[in-house]
Image (spheres, rainbow, N blue to C red):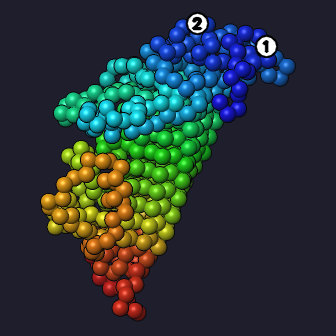
Amino acid sequence: MASIELDQLSRGHDGPSANIYSVTEWPAGNPHEDIGAVINSIIADIKRRQAAPDVNDGGKPGAVIYIPPGDFRLRTQVRIDISFLRIVGSGHGFTSSSIRFNTPRRELEQWHEIWPGGSRILVDLVGPAGDGAAAAAFLVQRAGNPRISSVEFADFCIDGLHFTDASNGDAENSYRNGKTGIHIASANDSFRITGMGLVYLEHGVVSYQADASTIDNNFIAECGNCIELRGMGQASKITNNLIGAGYAGHSIYAENFGGLLVSGNNVFPRGRSSIAFSGVVRSSITGNRLHAFYPGMLVFSGNCSENLIASNHFLRDHEPWAPMTRYDNGRDDQFGLLHLSGDNNSVIANHISASIDTRFLKPANEKPVIIRIVSGTGNYVANNHIVATTERAPENDAPNSDCFATQVEAILSTRNLTALEVIAVQVEPGSTGNTILDSGSDTQVLLDRSVNAFRGTPVPGRAGAQSSPRVDN
């Protein structure tokens, strides 16, 4: 541990380190066989010793529970109902399970390691279908006042082990197993989830009624859904994470939220959406790098309003890795890379790269839509740089079985590209009072110009050309 030396750890008995616990030093239970039961026993001890709510202007300082490096199976759900608890390990231990499960066994025999490591929890819970809380490794829940506060998870790995839905013929690529890493069911204040590794869970982090929460510097990938802020919430941040959900789920999802900051994240492809907001207002999506294999990278629904989307890099290309090319999110290219519903949102100074072989466009022979405003008024779309290209790969190219090399080569490929005709911005009929500036040429933007403001991006060789006053819808 960075801040706590191992010789400072105690077993919870009275003394200078009474509130620092190690799961491997606790006398009850075997943490390697069921760390859940051990942590619950420790929490019971904390509650027993810290029973008085007010002692000398204090009374319940909480505790630290340390998980050293190693594999710890979890067969009993950890139930947290105390504030000021920090559960911390010594390494997030992430490694790709998806690559492992799509690698021939004969190759695996040569691998240096095949499972996640660090301070690793192996989730062996199975809950009722549709009940994410029942199969959560960590369930945080407490009724009454005040709200549960300052619970922290830091620097350990939660591994769901296997996906199990074989309905599509390949269970390990289904992103479904009913398991959740951290489920926060109660209204909460000032929670922190930092430095964690979450892998092969249907739901990574789910938090209801969050206030002033921090989800920062985590590695949450190869999960059905990565981060979900549900119910309602305010004044929180999702920052500096490496994130990547499956084709049926969200990488970042928030609903009924105000004052949410999503910044500095590197979101991997393959999620149904990179970011999806429903009913989110007065929030910011800034300085992220977002990569997707499907349309609908950014989706606003439920009248999201007064949000800022600025200085992000969006990249849309096609899935290059052979084992996953059969999957998609079910949306076609008319849906839009950015699909927006709501009022008075600002979409400013984003770089949007769309590099798609025309063979993979749906519907065929139709121009893909980059930014689509499906409803709303007062939206401001300005100074976005849209680079749309296509490159037809040779038909006889053999697919590369190496996931890393395949995806890096696809990202780095900028040679032999030709321009792809797209609809840069499409504003649906009935959406009025919007302003579209310098985010597409006169022929690339479709909107009713009698009820929306428009200024086209100048086209080289056509200096001084004026936008046509025609009505497109």
**Residue 94: x and y, percent?**
46, 36
Q: Which mark is residue 15?
A: 1
Identity, as a three-letter code, of the amino acid under mark 2: Ala
Identity, as a three-letter code, of the amino acid under mark 1: Gly
Q: Image quadrant for the N terminus? A: top right
Q: Image quadrant for the C terminus? A: bottom left
Q: Report if residue 151 is visible in the image.
A: no
Q: Is residue 421 left or right of residue 97?
A: left
**Residue 239: x and y, percent?**
55, 48
**Residue 317: x and y, percent?**
31, 59
Looking at the image, which residue is at 49% across and 20% down? 72
Secondary structure state at the residue bearing disc 1? loop
Which is more toward the observer, 205 or 323? 323
Q: Report if residue 167 is visible in the image.
A: yes
- Please rate how many residues cluster around mark 2, counting C-alpha atoms within 10 Å: few if below 14, some from 14 to 19, many from 20: few
Sooner in the amino-acid sequence: mark 1 or mark 2: 1
The CA distance from mark 1 to mark 2 is 19 Å
Secondary structure state at the residue bearing disc 2? loop
Q: Which mark is residue 296?
A: none
Q: Is residue 83 left or right of residue 283?
A: right
Q: Where, by quadrant of the figure, is residue 426 drawn?
A: bottom left
Looking at the image, which residue is at 42% across and 22% down? 123
Q: Which residue is mark 2?
A: 28
Q: Is residue 298 left or right of residue 286?
A: left
Looking at the image, which residue is at 35% across and 79% down? 441
- Please rate how many residues cluster around mark 1, counting C-alpha atoms within 10 Å: few if below 14, some from 14 to 19, many from 20: few
Residue 357 vertical placement versus 229 (above, below): below
Residue 381 vertical placement versus 275 (above, below): below
Which is more toward the observer, 278 or 378? 278
Which is more toward the observer, 101 or 455? 101
